[in-house]
Image (cartoon, rainbow, N blue to C red):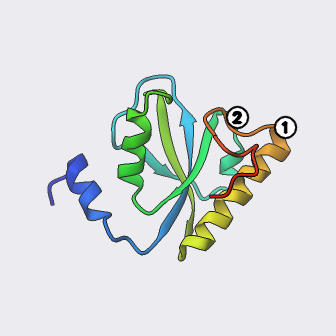
Amino acid sequence: MNYTKKANIQSCKANDKGYIYALVDLDEPSKWDMISYDDEKGAHLKENVRYIGVTSNPVERFCDHRCDKHKSKKIGMVIFDEAKHPAEGKAKEGTAIWQYIQKYGKGPKYQKGDDTWAGA
């Protein structure tokens, strides 16, 4: 298989799993493939976490975050949990955000909607 961004995005299409991830600050600009996995409990509670999310296509989602004018190119993606159903993924994402808020008193820097009553 050709190891390119486009090929990796395509290989994740129709994925039947969800991945709960954190975007983390880096010292230097990242490349499209700077995605890692951390099974350490509390990986989403580190000081350099800037966003917590869920996706079924981590390569595409990471590329979207890097291209977003509101986020930095100096970010990496750390997958820290998985889900077998979309509702499970949303629950795990919400729990991780809540744990972060309990630890730091507010949501991660790039998190939006964590302090409103708006629905998902």
In what quadrant of the picture does the C terminus appear? bottom right
Q: What element carries label 1?
A: loop
Tell me the amino acid under the disc marked 1.
Answer: Gly
x and y percentages locating residue 100 in the rendered image: 76, 46
Q: Which residue: 55% across, 67% down?
A: 82
x and y percentages locating residue 116 in the rendered image: 75, 46
In what quadrant of the picture does the N terminus appear? bottom left
- Where residue 30 sits, quadrant-wise, is top left
Label 2 Cα crowd, 10 Å radius (few <14 / some 14-19 / many 20+): few
Instruction: Determine whether 28 is above or below 99 in the image.
Output: above
x and y percentages locating residue 59 in the rendered image: 36, 51
Q: Which residue: 68% across, 37% down?
A: 108
**Counting residues from the N terminus, which is met first, the one under dot 1 or under dot 2?**
2
Q: In this orientation, does residue 41 appear? A: no
Residue under label 2, please give it.
47
Q: Which of 112 and 8 is in front in this view?
A: 112
Q: Which residue: 69% across, 40% down?
A: 46
Q: Nearer the viewer, residue 28 or 8?
A: 8
Q: What element carries label 2?
A: loop
